[in-house]
Image: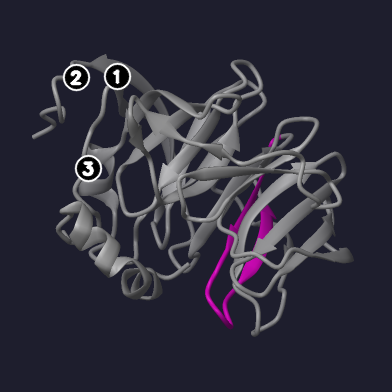
Amino acid sequence: MRLVDWLWLRLLTLMALGFGLGFGFLPQAWGAAPAREARIVAEWDHDPSLFTQALFFDGQDIVESAGLYGRSRVIRYRPGGQVLAEFRPGAEFFAEGAALVGDEIYVLTWREGVVFILDAQTLTLKKTLFLPRESWGLTFDGTQLWRSDGSAQLWPHQLSLAAAGRPVTVRDGDKTIKFLNELERDPQSGLILANIFGQTRVAFIEPRTGTVKFYLDCQKIAKKYAPKNPEAVLNGLALDPAGRLFLTGKLWPRLFQVDWDPIPMNGAPDLE
């Protein structure tokens, strides 16, 4: 979703929580879970016109969903390479999270209640399903889909999009972690990675319990590379077949492969 829309929806909540509005990102209130500092391993050009909502690998290719009304599209490309396939849903749709399910890609829309099912290779439309809910992020664990909606909950779905159980509330200790956005699942650990909207950290979540196991802090990367635009927030997480983590942001000109180092956690880490 767009930051301007989100701010109108969440302003009273943010004030009640004591958040202030910084340039581009919201201040981060750290909890009990440890943090690891992201460091750049490699980088590539990234189309700065893409309002990134989802990012994942299918083999050696990246699939990216980009939002905004009139500009939404889903593209398939090699890192730093040309677009291999593209899907444009129409000006009335705001594309959001997306996930690979076998040889198909599920693409959410923000408020329109439509889910597009695309051929994974060609990105041609195969069918549409309907989910009358606000939707942000999506990932697949091999059995069921997990969806975020900007709250502190992860919603499990069958492939038909019917509910697959009760939602899981994400917590760091006794603190609920709201504004969950783009999602990616790590098949090795089973953890779900989640961007937190407007912040420069990624939560690594145990989906059965909703417990945050640790955070990946990307503050230094965002501070150096994010465009000077309040909508250009960190968003977009992808694990390649070798388990390497890639990330970018909305309207960012660069795509990064990152690794991480532990950092001490006594409240907020000092990253200055």
Mark-to-mark CA distance, 3 and 1:
14 Å
160 relative position to 210: left or right: right
- Reading the image, the residue beneath label 3 is 28
Question: Residue at horizontal 78%, vertical 51%?
Answer: 105
The amino acid marked with disc number 2 is Met
> x and y percent of residue 166 in the render?
66, 40
Residue at 55 percent of width and 57 percent of height: 136
Residue at image coords 67%, 59%: 75
> Disc 1 to disc 2, how far (Cα)?
6 Å
Earlier sequence position, callout 3 versus callout 1: 3
Magenta span has 94? no
Q: Are marks 1 and 2 in contact (CB under 8 Å)?
A: yes
Q: Residues within 10 Å of mark 2 (few under 14, many from 20)?
A: some
Q: Amino acid at mark 1?
A: Pro
- Relative to 163, is 83 above or below? below
Q: Are marks 3 and 1 in contact (CB under 8 Å)?
A: no
Looking at the image, which is closer to me, 24 or 75?
A: 24
Find the magenta span and give its range.
60-76
* Horizontal and vertical percent position of residue 36: 31, 22
Is 68 inside the magenta-drawn segment?
yes
Q: Mark 3: which secondary structure?
A: loop
Q: Which is more N-terminal, label 2 or label 1?
A: 1
Which residue position is annotated with label 2?
A: 265
Nearer the N terminus, badge 2 or badge 3?
Answer: 3
Tell me how far mark 2 sits from mark 3, CA to CA.
13 Å
- Amino acid carrying mark 3 in the image: Gln
- Residue 252 vertical placement versus 188 (above, below): below
Residue at the image position 41 percent from the left and 63 percent from the top: 251
Quickly name the residue at label 1: 34
